[in-house]
Structure formats: structure tokens, C-alpha cells
């Protein structure tokens, strides 16, 4: 009986060993197959390390050069141009005569006003004599008090007429003085839009036309639109270098003087003004230039290849490898564009493995397999 039981147990153990020896390798093979399948199914990616940006940033921005003082010159009286004394390119001083206008109508009005003033003064003199005589006659009761009052008030009225005539003559004489056009400040004539015999209309609108344009060029204003990301360091006193295509290899000095202190809602830029000395006149108003700004940065910035960016509807993202086996999309804020590389001013710590050329279909949590690592660039 015991013998038969031992034989049964031994047979059971043999059968169990045979079954286990057949199933375990198969289960192990299935597990290895699943692991290999998952590994092969993971997306193959290449990664790179972010390059840390320099603490001092230099940016190059387009700039517009303008004259420090710039004024169009219009006529203040009507007439015909009699003579001009300054052509384009003429350097003039403040108060220098630019042109003369022949104003026959104003001349006649001035002559008429002088005659009217003379008539008013004569009437005033007569009224004064009459009022004085009536005052003397009143003492002997030769005239009534009413007649004296009439003579006195007539004298006052004639006096007011004389004052009105004087003011009218002064107004016309001032208008006549505008026959001569003078330079308002030291500068250069950049435009002359009239010639001898041309009809001149006063004012700055309608049929009136600008006669001259004068610009002060001893010092120039340079206007630059600074991106919002750098607006906080664009402070008065900031030094900059100005370059122009017509002066290769040369850099002109400029200093920031003021800002608009407002971000343009459309362009997201800050308008700033630089001043640059121009004693030799090499900088011309209206010229295009490039200004080079060295901006100190208190925040850490990083440089990434443009190929690492993902442009999504919710904003710009970069894909990184998390825990060495899955992708994660993080939001970043860009700074300068260097062509093949871009500056990242926010969103990175610097120790991430950033995926190069991520596919548009990549999502956070997706399994990835790193096959190539780009060493941190110098």
C-alpha cells in the first residue's frame, strides 16, 4: 500500500516536472517577446542638450535715423515768390534769410490801414477840441449838459476807433513782415519746393505747399523697436553701436535717451530713442541702419536648434525624454532667432534631453527610444 502511494507520488512529481519544464520557458519566451515588441514599438528619437546662453546678450535690430530737429517751412502770407536764397544742401544759421515773397495785396491793405488810421486820428483830434470847448461853454451856461455829454462820449468813441485802426495796422504789418522767410534753427535745407514766380498760399493745409524743409543734423535721433522680452533692460544711458551698409567696418556710438514706456499691442515692441553725435554729417536723416545692443541678462537662457520646436495651437512646445523612456511636451518662451538656432528665455532648466525633429503626432506620455545623443555643443 505504501509502495503504491510512493509510486503515485513519484509519477505525479515526474509529470509536474515535465509540465513545468515545458510551460516556464514558453512563458519566459512570451515575456521576452512582449518586451521586445514594446521596445521595437517605441518611437526612435535623437536627443540633444540645451546650450546655456551668455549672461550678456547682444542683439541686432533695424533702426531708423532721423534729424534731431526737423521742420517744414510754410508761408504765413499770400503772394508770389520774389527770390530764394537757399537751395537743398545749404547749411543755414538760425534767422538766416531763405526767401522773399512779393505781396502786393497785403501792401495795399497796409497802405489803406495807414490812411484809415490817419483819418481816425484826425477825427479824434477834432472830437477832443469839440469836447474841450463844450466843457468851457458849460461854465457860462452857453450850452446844455446834454450837449457836453454828447461831445465827451463822441470823443471816447473816436478814441476807440483810433485804437482799433492801430491794432488793424499792426496786424497787417506783421502779416507783411512774413514776406521774408527765415531759418528757424541751425541746420541744412533738405528740400526746396518752390521757385521764383510761384504762387504762394499761406498756411499748411488746402492749397498751401511746403516751401522748404530744414533739418538739424549735428546730432541724430535713432528710433528702434525693441522686442518686449528685452524691454525691461532698455533703460536711458544704455550704450549701443550703430552700423550702416555704406560704412562697412565702422561703428558709430549711440546712447539710449528715452522710451515710449508703452508696449505696442500689435507688434509687442517698445519704441526707444537713441542719440548719436554727427559732427561731420556722415549720418543722414531717413537712413536705415542696424543698432547693436548689449543687454545684461539676469535670467538663464538656453540655445536650441530650430528643429527641436513644435508649433501647436496652444503655443510653442519642445519634446523631452522623461525617465529615459517616454516623451513629455513642455511649453517654452522664445527670445532671439539666430536662423538655425533659437534662444529660449523660459521653460527649460538646462538638464533636459530635448528630442530633435519631433514628429507632429508626438504626445506626452508616448513611449520613445533614444538611439542617438547629440553631445552638448560648445
Image (spheres, rainbow, N blue to C red):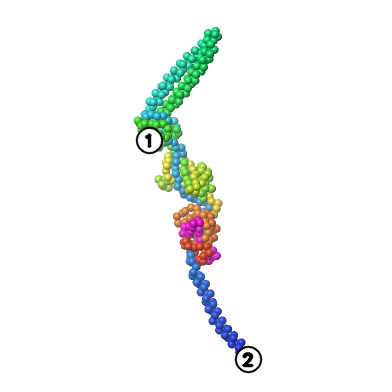
- Circle 1 packing at 10 Å, graded few (<14), some (14-19), many (20+), is few
- Circle 2 packing at 10 Å, graded few (<14), some (14-19), many (20+), is few
Residue 321 included in the magenta stretch of the image: yes
**Residue 256 percent location from the top left of the image:** 50, 43
- Closer mark to the observer between disc 1 and disc 2: 2
**Residue 4 percent location from the top left of the image:** 62, 91
**Residue 261 visible in rendering:** yes
Residue 112 included in the magenta stretch of the image: no
Q: Which residue, as the protein is rendered here, is positioned at the far left?
A: 197
The secondary structure making up most of the magenta span is: strand
Q: Which disc is residue 193 wearing?
A: 1
**Residue 63 percent location from the top left of the image:** 45, 45
Q: Which disc is residue 3 wearing?
A: 2
**Residue 279 visible in rendering:** no
Q: Which residue, as the protein is rendered here, is positioned at the far right?
A: 2
The quadrant of the picture occupied by the N terminus is: bottom right
N-terminal of the two: label 1 or label 2?
2
Q: Secondary structure at mark 2?
A: helix
Depicted 356 relative to depicted 99: above or below: below
**Residue 331 percent location from the top left of the image:** 52, 57
Q: Which residues are magenta?
A: 303-326
Whether pointer 1 and pointer 2 mark residues with C-beta atoms closer than 8 Å, the reply is no
Q: Which disc is residue 78 wearing?
A: none
Depicted 237 relative to depicted 359: above or below: above
**Which sits in the foreground, 292 or 305?**
305
Q: Secondary structure at mark 1?
A: loop
Amino acid at each position: 500500500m505504501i509502495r503504491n502511494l510512493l509510486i503515485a507520488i513519484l509519477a505525479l512529481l515526474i509529470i509536474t516536472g515535465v509540465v513545468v519544464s515545458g510551460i516556464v520557458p514558453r512563458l519566459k519566451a512570451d515575456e521576452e517577446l512582449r518586451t521586445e515588441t514594446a521596445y521595437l514599438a517605441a518611437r526612435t528619437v535623437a536627443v540633444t542638450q540645451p546650450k546655456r546662453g551668455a549672461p550678456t546678450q547682444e542683439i541686432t535690430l533695424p533702426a531708423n535715423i532721423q534729424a534731431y530737429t526737423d521742420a517744414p517751412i510754410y508761408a504765413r502770407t499770400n503772394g508770389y515768390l520774389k527770390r530764394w536764397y537757399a537751395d537743398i544742401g545749404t547749411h543755414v544759421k538760425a534767422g538766416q534769410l531763405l526767401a522773399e515773397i512779393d505781396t502786393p495785396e497785403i501792401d495795399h491793405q497796409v497802405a489803406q490801414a495807414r490812411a484809415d488810421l490817419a483819418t481816425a486820428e484826425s477825427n479824434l483830434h477834432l472830437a477832443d477840441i469839440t469836447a474841450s470847448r463844450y466843457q468851457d461853454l458849460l461854465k457860462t451856461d452857453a450850452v446844455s449838459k446834454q450837449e457836453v455829454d454828447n461831445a465827451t462820449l463822441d470823443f471816447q468813441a473816436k478814441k476807440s476807433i483810433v485804437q482799433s485802426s492801430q491794432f488793424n495796422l499792426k496786424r497787417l504789418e506783421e502779416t507783411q513782415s512774413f514776406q521774408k522767410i527765415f531759418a528757424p534753427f541751425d541746420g541744412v535745407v533738405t528740400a526746396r519746393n518752390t521757385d521764383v514766380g510761384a504762387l504762394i498760399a499761406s498756411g499748411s493745409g488746402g492749397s498751401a505747399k511746403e516751401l522748404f524743409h530744414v533739418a538739424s543734423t549735428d546730432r541724430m535721433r535713432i528710433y528702434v523697436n525693441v522686442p518686449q522680452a528685452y524691454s525691461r533692460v532698455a533703460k536711458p544711458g544704455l550704450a549701443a553701436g550703430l552700423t550702416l551698409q555704406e560704412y562697412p567696418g565702422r561703428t558709430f556710438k549711440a546712447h539710449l535717451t528715452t522710451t515710449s514706456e508703452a508696449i505696442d499691442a500689435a507688434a509687442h515692441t517698445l519704441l526707444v530713442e537713441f542719440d548719436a553725435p554727427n559732427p561731420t554729417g556722415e549720418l543722414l536723416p531717413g537712413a536705415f541702419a542696424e543698432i547693436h545692443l548689449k543687454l545684461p541678462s539676469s535670467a538663464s537662457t538656453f540655445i536650441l536648434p530650430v528643429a527641436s520646436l513644435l508649433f501647436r495651437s496652444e503655443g510653442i512646445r519642445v519634446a523631452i525624454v522623461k525617465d529615459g523612456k517616454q516623451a513629455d511636451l513642455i511649453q517654452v518662451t522664445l527670445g532671439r532667432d539666430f536662423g538655425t538656432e533659437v534662444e529660449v528665455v523660459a521653460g527649460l532648466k538646462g538638464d533636459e534631453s530635448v528630442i530633435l525633429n519631433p514628429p507632429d503626432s508626438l504626445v506626452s506620455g508616448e513611449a520613445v527610444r533614444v538611439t542617438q545623443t547629440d553631445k552638448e555643443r560648445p
